[in-house]
Amino acid sequence: MSGIWGKSIRLSIFGESHGKAIGINIDGLPPGFEIDIDGIKQEMARRAPGKSILSTSRAEEDEFEIISGFFEGRTTGAPLCAIIKNTDSISAHYSEMQAKMRPGHADYTGYVKYKGFNDYRGGGHFSGRLTAPLVFAGAIARQMLEKRGVIIGSHIKSIGSVQDEAFDPVNIDAQALKSIRDKVLPVIDDQIGEKMKEAVLAAMEQADSLGGIIECAAVNVPEGLGDPFFDSVESSLSHLLFSIPSVKGVEFGAGFDIAYMRGSEANDELYIKDGIVKTYTNNNGGILGGITCGMPLVFRAAIKPTPSIGREQRTVDIKGKKNTSIQVSGRHDPCIVSRAVPVVEAAAALVLLDFMLFESRVK
Ligand SMILES: Cc1cc2nc3c(=O)[nH]c(=O)nc-3n(C[C@H](O)[C@H](O)[C@H](O)COP(=O)(O)O)c2cc1C
Ligand SMILES: C=C(O[C@@H]1CC(C(=O)O)=C[C@@H](OP(=O)(O)O)[C@H]1O)C(=O)O
């Protein structure tokens, strides 16, 4: 399995959802950075399961233990490794899944790729639980970025057919981005948030699930990060975002809508104010030619509806080699979107930090 990512910082994720623990090794962090442990705990709590009606009822505190690379409150520069123990797994829920492949989950591909030796309990290494270590690493990256003035925040743009307002991609206020983080349901319009909750609960009653879209922005991003080919900011962000289980689409700026515009509408016209080059619009999401232009970075990630649902669906019995059906029981998120918000932000923080450290090392 290739749980390794990054060019300046190197992340290696390990563990399974029903194993002893999950964790992450982060190599390449600069030495001497004072880590705010409470800040990491706050980020972990935003993602942790079992805290709301819209979440799986699996109750994990997601307490982490840093076992290397951290001394007297600061990074040492050596690999920083943290583990998070699994404390509330119920593996009996998965005895049927040894043979019956859940539609929409990774049971079948996991079985094929790892020749049936994969730990299928709770989705094993494929589980959304493995995003807890990513949020841990992202929280450190976020703290390093905030010291340099870069602020990342996001909101739930939609759940099912219920739509929140969109960010104004030109004028995004750093303070507003920070304060939306403190909301239990991070939306711009709280009334819309209530409608989203109702939609999820209604789907739940029908033994079904909902997906949605997360809109994320980063402000005060330095211009000049990224490369035209292969290491463009879009491709690097997409790499990490598509590594998050359940992300099935990523778009930047106007995204797919840009295809319906004319050049005269799509082009972000330039101007200078107080010596700084800006654009009147931001259809390119703060990236041109793979390189940041100094405008807010704006992108969206599409999250699919939770695959494990109580509704009867057709599938196969891989051991008996026959067609069958499945009704998934156990504890599942009726909608993954709200818990994926801090994960998407973590991915953005890690990518931006990776680029910024790279640029400062090559200069
Ligand atoms: C935070 C988070 C929580 C998730 N919770 C569940 C869940 O409770 N039940 C489930 O079937 N899938 C859940 N998923 C999604 C599956 O892990 C994911 O769909 C599966 O690994 C297949 O990968 P793919 O959707 O990227 O193809 C969750 C994902 C994330 C990021
Ligand atoms: C435990 C977490 O989410 C889990 C993600 C998940 C999946 O299939 O992705 C399935 C469920 O696992 P279980 O059946 O063991 O409860 C979720 O609870 C977590 O995010 O920390």
Image (tube, grey):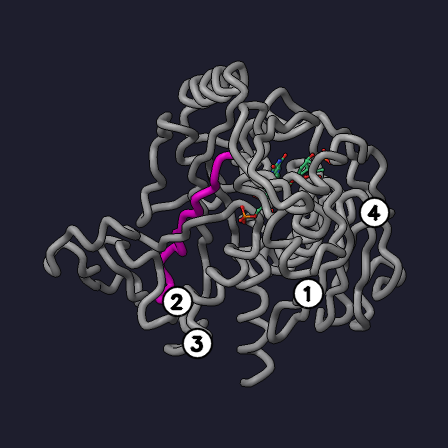
Classify the position of ligand 1 by quadrant: top left, top right, bottom left or bottom right.
top right
Residue toward you, 149 or 110: 110
Cα distance between the residues tagged 4 and 3: 36 Å
Residue toward you, 203 or 82: 203
Place residue 243 in its image quadrant: bottom right
Question: Residue beneath label 1, please?
Answer: 1
Three-letter amino acid code of the residue under disc 2:
Thr
Q: Which residues are magenta?
A: 293-305
Cα distance between the residues tagged 3 and 1: 22 Å
Question: Residue beneath label 2, please?
Answer: 292
Q: Secondary structure at mark 1?
A: loop
| x 80%, y 35%: residue | 91
Cα distance between the residues tagged 4 and 1: 16 Å
Q: Secondary structure at mark 2?
A: strand
- In this view, the mark in front (2 or 1): 1
* Mark with earlier residue (2, 4): 4
Does residue 28 lie above or below 217 as drawn? below
Cα distance between the residues tagged 2 and 4: 40 Å
Three-letter amino acid code of the residue under disc 4:
Gly
Question: Residue beneath label 3, please?
Answer: 230
* Mark with earlier residue (2, 1): 1
Image side of residue 340 versus residue 272, left or right: right
* Mark with earlier residue (3, 2): 3
Question: Residue beneath label 4, please?
Answer: 19
